[in-house]
Image: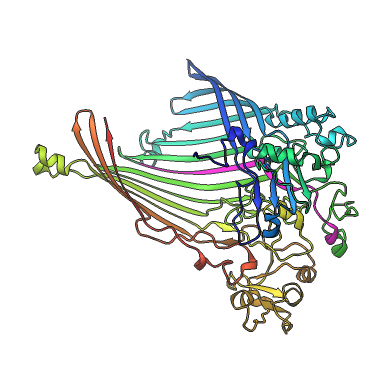
């Protein structure tokens, strides 16, 4: 006998078992279509710093050079998948559809990162130092490998995956200019007041006032690159619709599947412009953040420090996901050009560009701001060390991530109005935690003075240490979102391409009504979902009543009795807007209260050998931190906006022994 696996190593990813999609109620066969995959990174770095003191100046300079070689082994569906609508079809080897991904399954990305800096710290006076500096960064454009691969492949008719009658520029991934102007200036100062009349306030050399401004650049993370690498025109995801028997080969691994269906794959005839694509903006570049702060630090005695400072950041050109070819036919037909840019009209198929498929683009369209008052207190009293900090802040943006969480924070990655991705989405961001307070302590338990010098007592009673942390913060926000109401004004196909849920938000009702209450109009309740045959006298029903008790009498409501109104065709026309007026992150979840506690016992066995026992209690008070609830208004009454449906992390206790020698 022997043993084996249908999921080989990532290096043999193209030889894995195919995927068999069986009817509901039966387990599928084979690894998921996005497995196996792997990534190998080789990093080479040269780093050097130089400093010299010349009079009152301290000059610093340095460089950081990194060579990154990344082998990414990932091509979705590269070994094929077979879909069967019934068991007899499976037994008779008659799949309904056969899908396979064609293209290069191993990509060798090369990135050369360069960073150089120069700084002059000028001690103008003994109590005042001014620092000026500049940094230059260049990370290249590793995504241009996709242009190189597709240009080489499509320029040769014998290797081209797509119709060679299509212009080459439309069969290749576009090249992007390298961002070569990333200069980042910085300025800072440190001042120790020596004011005779304010000596009691500032102390003698006990106070420092610091401030500064700096600009820093961010890298393009590899998810952006890899998403484009697994979409047209880099790869060709072919699907064959068939009820022909015998398509599943005797060897249902990648090589066998590709050989069996090679003659049926329409390579050389497909137009990549009509296939779903994930691209980047023509001017794709590094985002940057402006950072600025001003603070004061005061020392009291020898063991206590108090600090307060203002901290602000402004993010510019941050990454954002957009629908670059939206479906706008229904919006134009019912609302005219009111919600379209000047001169924009839908093509005959309803999309912005008629001869193109779905296009998901990553652009530098997001911006953010963060302003905070940050304070801290640290002290030491004999064996006790105590620290505490409090932050009051506000964070605003129009996109917090390129991916949606479908939960708290960045619920949806895409704007509900594809032509208003800026101001229409600007609101409190995913990282807006208005109040954050934390404290910590470490206490070394002393041995009673009467027992000091007693070796046995010191072994048994010595070496104990207790510590703890406590954190509480304001709740994370979330965006009430519609999943499957089927509004004609949402781009259903694009939603399916990006997680399967709509990007529309509901309309606002009464802000004082329960957050979980949602109204649904008569037309949608009766004609779309078939919840009831009886119109509500108010024109609206409580959606919660349908979800809670489908067989009981529905509950009529007025719009003043609910927090949200489902965004449907009827309500959109009622409000005169296809896009809901509820803002991003309009609702808060549960606040966090988290305390941890630990006990340590260190026992010295020999001079260089120590045994440590530890007992750690996470969430020691077992407080339920419920996070954010279900964000989808469709689930009103069965989870939406209701923290009672959430589970909470419970107290966790762990013990450990560590021997060091």
User: Where in the figure is residue 162, as x and y percent of width and height?
Assistant: 83, 37
Please state the extent of the stretch shown in magenta in the rendering: 305-331
User: Where in the figure is residue 398, as x and y percent of width and height?
Assistant: 67, 50
Residue 307 is one of the magenta-drawn residues? yes
Q: Is residue 364 left or right of residue 451?
A: right
Q: Is residue 129 left or right of residue 140?
A: left
User: Where in the figure is residue 215, as x and y percent of width and height?
Assistant: 61, 34
Count the marks: 0
In which quadrant of the rendered view does residue 207 lie?
top left
Q: Nearer the viewer, residue 605 or 243?
A: 243
Residue 93 is one of the magenta-drawn residues? no
Q: Nearer the viewer, residue 102 or 439?
A: 102
Q: Is residue 66 left or right of residue 140?
A: left
Residue lying furthest front: 1
Looking at the picture, the colour scheme in use is rainbow
Q: Is residue 105 above or below residue 654?
A: above
In which quadrant of the rendered view does residue 533 lie?
bottom right
Q: Nearer the viewer, residue 312 or 642?
A: 642
Residue visible at 85% across and 29% down in the picture: 157
């Amino acid at each position: 006998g022997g043993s084996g696996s249908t999921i080989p190593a990532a290096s043999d990813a193209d030889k894995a078992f195919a995927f068999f999609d069986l009817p509901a109620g039966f387990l599928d066969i084979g690894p998921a279509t996005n497995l196996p995959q792997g990534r190998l990174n080789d990093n080479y770095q040269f780093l050097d710093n130089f400093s010299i003191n010349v009079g009152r100046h301290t000059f610093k300079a340095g460089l950081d050079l990194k060579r990154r070689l990344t082998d990414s082994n990932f091509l979705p569906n590269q070994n094929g998948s077979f879909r069967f609508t019934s068991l007899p079809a499976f037994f008779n080897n008659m799949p309904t559809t056969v899908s396979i991904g064609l293209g290069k399954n191993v990509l060798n990305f090369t990135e050369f990162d360069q960073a150089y800096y120069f700084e002059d710290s000028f001690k103008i006076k003994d109590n005042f130092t001014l620092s000026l500096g500049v940094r230059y960064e260049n990370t290249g454009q590793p995504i241009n490998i996709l242009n190189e691969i597709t240009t080489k492949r499509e320029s040769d008719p014998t290797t081209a995956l797509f119709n060679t009658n299509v212009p080459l520029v439309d069969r290749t991934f576009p090249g992007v200019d390298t961002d070569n102007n990333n200069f980042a200036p910085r300025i800072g100062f440190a001042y120790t007041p020596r004011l005779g009349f304010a000596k009691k306030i500032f102390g003698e050399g006990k106070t420092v006032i610091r401030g500064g401004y700096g600009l820093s650049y961010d890298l393009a993370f590899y998810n952006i690159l890899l998403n484009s690498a697994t979409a047209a025109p880099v790869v060709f995801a072919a699907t064959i619709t068939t009820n022909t028997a015998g398509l599943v080969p005797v060897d249902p691994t990648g090589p066998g599947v590709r050989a069996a269906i090679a003659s049926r794959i329409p390579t050389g005839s497909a137009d990549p412009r009509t296939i779903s694509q994930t691209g980047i903006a023509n001017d794709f570049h590094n985002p940057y953040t402006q950072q600025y702060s001003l603070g004061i630090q005061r020392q009291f005695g020898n063991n206590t420090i108090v600090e307060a400072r203002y901290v602000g950041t402004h993010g510019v050109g941050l990454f954002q996901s957009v629908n670059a070819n939206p479906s706008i036919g229904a919006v134009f037909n019912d609302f005219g050009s009111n919600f379209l840019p000047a001169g924009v009209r839908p093509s005959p198929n309803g999309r912005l560009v008629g001869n193109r498929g779905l296009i998901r683009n990553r652009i530098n369209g997001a911006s953010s701001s963060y302003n905070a008052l940050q304070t801290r207190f640290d002290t030491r009293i004999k064996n006790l060390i105590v620290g505490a900090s409090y932050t009051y802040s506000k964070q605003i943006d129009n996109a917090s991530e390129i991916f949606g969480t479908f939960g708290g924070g960045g619920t949806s990655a895409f704007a509900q109005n594809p032509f208003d991705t800026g101001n229409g989405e600007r609101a409190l961001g995913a990282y807006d935690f208005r109040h954050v307070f934390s404290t910590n302590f470490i206490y070394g338990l002393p041995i009673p003075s009467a027992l000091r010098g007693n070796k046995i007592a010191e072994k048994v009673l010595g070496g104990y240490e207790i510590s703890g942390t406590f954190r509480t913060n304001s709740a994370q926000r979330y965006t009430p979102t519609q999943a499957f109401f089927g509004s004609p004004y949402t781009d259903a196909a694009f939603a399916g391409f990006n997680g399967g849920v709509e990007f529309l938000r509901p309309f606002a009702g009464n802000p004082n009504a329960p957050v979980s209450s949602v109204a649904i109009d008569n037309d949608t309740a009766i004609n779309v979902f078939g919840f009831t045959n009886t119109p509500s006298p108010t024109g609206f029903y409580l959606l919660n009543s349908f979800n809670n008790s489908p067989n009981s009498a529905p509950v009529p409501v007025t719009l003043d009795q609910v927090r949200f109104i489902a965004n449907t065709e009827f309500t959109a026309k009622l409000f005169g807007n296809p896009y809901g007026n509820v803002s991003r992150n309009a609702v808060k979840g549960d606040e966090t209260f988290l305390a941890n506690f630990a006990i340590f016992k260190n026992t010295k066995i020999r001079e260089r050998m120590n045994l440590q026992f530890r007992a750690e209690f996470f969430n020691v008070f077992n407080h339920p931190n419920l996070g954010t609830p279900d964000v989808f208004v469709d689930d009103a009454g069965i989870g939406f906006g209701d923290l009672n449906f959430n589970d909470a992390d419970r107290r966790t206790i762990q013990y450990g022994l560590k021997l060091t020698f």
